[in-house]
Every structure is written in structure tokens, then in C-alpha cells.
Image (cartoon, grey):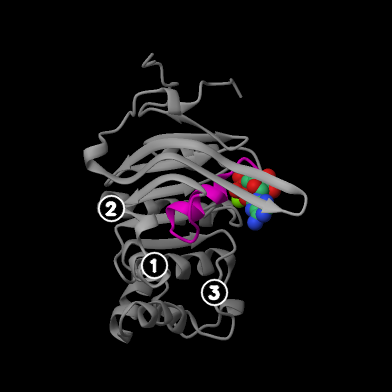
Amino acid sequence: MKELPNFSSFDDQTRPDCAVIALHGVTREYVGHAGAVRALSDATFSIVAGEWVAITGPSGSGKSTLVNLIGCLDRPTSGQLKIDNVDVASMSATELDRFRADKIGFIFQQFHLIPYLSALENVMLAQYFHSMTDEGEARAALEKVGLGKRAEHLPSELSGGEQQRVCIARALINNPPILLADEPTGNLDAANQEIVAGLLKDLHGQGHTIVMVTHDPEMAGLAQRRIALSHGKVFCHPVGGSPVVTLRR
Ligand SMILES: Nc1ncnc2c1ncn2[C@@H]1O[C@H](COP(=O)(O)OP(=O)(O)O)[C@@H](O)[C@H]1O
Ligand SMILES: [Mg+2]
């Protein structure tokens, strides 16, 4: 891949006043017995409400670290991260749990469904952790992803594509404004990839902000903007796909 200058040295492409996700100098270091690893280095960028952004980069480049930070599953070592204009550092662990449940829906490559719960119960569990269960709504969410007839099935009785659709129903059940997807089609065949891509397109059309890690150029091509990572450094591509060229210096 052609080396691009670090995005931190550029003007932000987006309007920070509309940002639903805003990072300023965000660094995440992991400290282990073998020393410190800087998994994300001085990331500065914003994502506006309703945007669909693809995060790309080779294995080990910091994609999951970035997604975990945006998803409030982790906190920066330094720098400022704001989600919906709230500084994540200002919240206690309990407040952060509540905030995450309200704001973010997660779609994982490995699905992370509870194996002994049915599709319906998996979706209802997300309702339970958020507020209260509502079976009718959970069934409607499964119907929306084409799984109305599979509600009582266990994950092991569903194909990979079906499990991912349960995951999408679960991510959406509490109507979060932000959807975070880490390789949502990584384990799917072409037909199911198309179904999931179609669902993401619909969700984007309905106004959700989507941040999606993907290795797949076709999936990345669906997004409006690409944020590429290399060795923990962020390189931003503007809408339209060509490299950013507006130097601030
Ligand atoms: N918990 C951790 N402890 C130590 N190093 C980690 C930890 N998580 C990730 N890393 C390191 O941080 C870097 C980025 O990892 P990751 O964000 O998982 O990359 P990607 O998702 O792009 O494959 C890698 O070098 C990885 O080994
Ligand atoms: Mg990863």
C-alpha cells in the first residue's frame, strides 16, 4: 500500500461540530512483561452522524484496538475520545456500561452468541441488559433480518449467515445510533455476505452511523470513507476514495 502521511497532520475532513465520534491524539499502549506495545498511535479524526466508515489495515495494525476504544470497551492510554460529545474519560465504569448499551450496537466476526440460548433469547438478553425484555419486539427484530422462522433455534442449529443476522438483530434491538462491526462478513460465504451487506445498506439508509472493520475491498467499497491503519497509525481517505491532500502546515 502506498504510504500516506499521518492523518494527525491534516485538517479534519469532517465537521467536528457534527461528530458523533471524535478522537484527538488517542494513543493506546499495552504493557506486558515483554515491554510496551503501542497498538494505536496519536489518532485524530472524527466521524459524523450517519456516516459509514470502513477501517482497513493488515493484521496487527490496531483495528480491533481502535474499535474497542470507540465501543467504550477500553479506554485510551492518552488523548481524548468523545462519543456523542461526551468525553469517555469522564465516566465511571458503571456509567460507561450504561452509555455503551444506549449508544452502541456490536456486530462481531465470531458472532459471540450465547450457545445455550435460542436466537430469540439471545436478542432478549440484550434487551434485558439494556432495560427490560419485550418478546414481541425481539421477534420483530428477527423478522427484520429474515429470521422470523428461526427464532426458537439455537446458534448451533443456524448457519453462519443466520447467526450473523441474529447478531445484527441483537445489535439493533435497543436502537443504538452507532453500529460497530468487526469483520461482519469475515466468516460468511458470498451469498450471506450479500445479505449482510444489504442489511448494513438499509441501516445506513435509516441514519445509523456505521464503523466497520473489513479486509474485503468489496465491503470497504460500500462505505463512504476509509480509515486505513498501519502499525497503529491512522491514514484517512476522504469521501470519494482518493488520498487526503490538504496539508495544514
Ligand atoms: N491485550 C494486549 N496486550 C498486548 N498487546 C496487544 C493486546 N491487544 C493487542 N495487542 C497488540 O497490539 C497490536 C494491535 O492489535 P489489534 O488491535 O488486535 O490489531 P488488528 O485488529 O488490526 O489485527 C498488535 O501488535 C497486538 O499484538
Ligand atoms: Mg482485529
Q: How many marks?
A: 3
* Amino acid found under the numbered disc labelled 1: Ser
Q: Residue at x 49, y 51 (%)?
A: 67
Disc 2 from disc 1: Cα separation: 17 Å
Question: Going from the N terminus, do you reach mark 2 or mark 3 first?
Answer: 2
* Amino acid found under the numbered disc labelled 2: Asp
Q: Residue at x 45, y 21 (%)?
A: 243
Q: In what quadrant of the picture does the C terminus appear?
A: top left
Please indicate, yes or no, whether residue 145 appears anywhere in the rendered image. no
Image quarter for residue 111?
bottom right
Asked if disc 3 and disc 1 are in contact, CB closer than 8 Å, the reply is: no
Q: Nearer the viewer, mark 2 or mark 1?
A: 1
> Of the numbered discs in the image, which one, if any, rests on residue 84?
2
Q: Which residue is mark 3?
A: 113
Q: Nearer the viewer, mark 2 or mark 3?
A: 2
Disc 2 from disc 3: Cα separation: 28 Å
